């Protein structure tokens, strides 16, 4: 005859089941994290089967920083000469990004463009990043007939056939190449600006709102390269104006 569960036994069973399912959820999350997408040429191949012959990947970097331009790149890869190891620039080591940057410049049609801090403040960061993308596409040696755009929006100023690909820098080789070119270019710009405006740590934080960058803003003030429409910068300017009054 089966004995009824006591209150203590029932509690132990409940806790054991809860721990089991929590462990399984954690395992599933780790497994999911391990299975990360690797960019391939399938989007480009699909576009070719639809009749397009010159496909460019487009990406931007620099939406989140408090300082510096937003930078975009457009890249048309040669299907017969695709660099090995292309991936989302954030998934690569700095050394590997630098190496791939040089290889991409040597074997692909590449265009790089920017939107300035003044344009970011006048237009808003989304429109400015789209403007940089539009400029990058316009700068290619030969006009592409189809674009693969990283993200969920196609810039409204583009007149070429386009498709937006969410997380495209981790899915499309052309967009991966564009993400690498844009990041290396912008990082170098911020390193140069760091020499002119020491103390903000731009050589390592690339203008992003790190703790040290925010502290430097408080102690050193706002530079001409800071985005005044961004809240942390705007707040400091507002405080300074009130103090002076």
Image: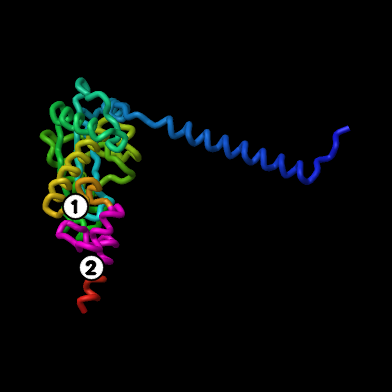
Residue at numbered disc 1: 68
Q: Residue at x 13, y 47 (%)?
A: 192
The local secondary structure at tag 2 comes to helix
Q: Label 2, label 1: how many angstroms apart (C-alpha)?
A: 17 Å
Q: Is residue 50 magenta?
A: no
The answer to whether mark 2 and mark 1 are in CB contact below 8 A is: no
Image quadrant of residue 17? top right
Residue neighbourhood size for the residue with mark 2, other residues' Cα within 10 Å, grouped as few (<14), some (14–19), many (≥20): some
Q: Is residue 232 magenta?
A: yes
Residue 18 pos. (x, y %): 64, 41
Residue 48 pos. (x, y %): 26, 27
Image quadrant of residue 145? top left
Nearest to the observer: residue 121 or residue 187: 187
- 81 relative to 157, above or below: above
The residues colored magenta run 209-236
Residue 67 pos. (x, y %): 21, 54
Residue 51 pos. (x, y %): 25, 28
The extreme top residue here reads 80
Residue at numbered disc 2: 237
Nearest to the observer: residue 1 or residue 199: 199
Q: Is residue 3 left or right of residue 110?
A: right
Q: Quadrant of the N terminus?
A: top right
- 38 relative to 207, above or below: above
Image quadrant of residue 152? top left
Residue neighbourhood size for the residue with mark 1, other residues' Cα within 10 Å, grouped as few (<14), some (14–19), many (≥20): many
The extreme right residue here reads 1
Q: Quadrant of the C terminus?
A: bottom left
Q: Is residue 198 left or right of residue 211?
A: left
């Amino acid at each position: 005859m089966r004995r009824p569960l006591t209150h203590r036994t029932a509690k132990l069973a409940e806790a054991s089941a809860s721990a089991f399912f929590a462990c399984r959820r954690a395992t599933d999350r780790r497994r999911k994290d391990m299975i990360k997408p690797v960019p391939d040429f399938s989007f480009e191949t699909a576009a070719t089967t639809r009749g397009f012959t010159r496909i460019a990947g487009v990406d931007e970097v620099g939406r989140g920083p408090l300082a510096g331009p937003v930078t975009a790149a457009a890249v048309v890869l040669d299907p017969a000469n695709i660099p090995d190891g292309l991936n989302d620039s954030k998934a690569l080591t700095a050394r590997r990004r630098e190496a791939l940057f040089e290889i991409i410049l040597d074997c692909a049609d590449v265009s790089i463009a920017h939107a300035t801090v003044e344009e970011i403040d006048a237009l808003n960061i989304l429109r400015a990043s789209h403007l940089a993308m539009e400029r990058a596409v316009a700068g290619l040696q030969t006009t592409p007939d189809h674009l693969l755009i990283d993200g969920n929006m196609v810039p409204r100023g583009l007149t070429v056939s386009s498709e937006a690909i969410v997380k495209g820098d981790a899915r499309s080789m052309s967009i991966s190449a564009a993400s690498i070119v844009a990041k290396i270019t912008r990082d170098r710009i911020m390193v140069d600006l760091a020499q002119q405006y020491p103390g903000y740590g731009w050589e390592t934080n690339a203008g992003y709102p790190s703790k040290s960058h925010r502290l430097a803003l408080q102690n050193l003030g706002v530079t001409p390269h800071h985005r005044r429409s961004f809240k942390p910068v705007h707040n400091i300017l507002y405080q300074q104006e009130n103090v002076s009054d």
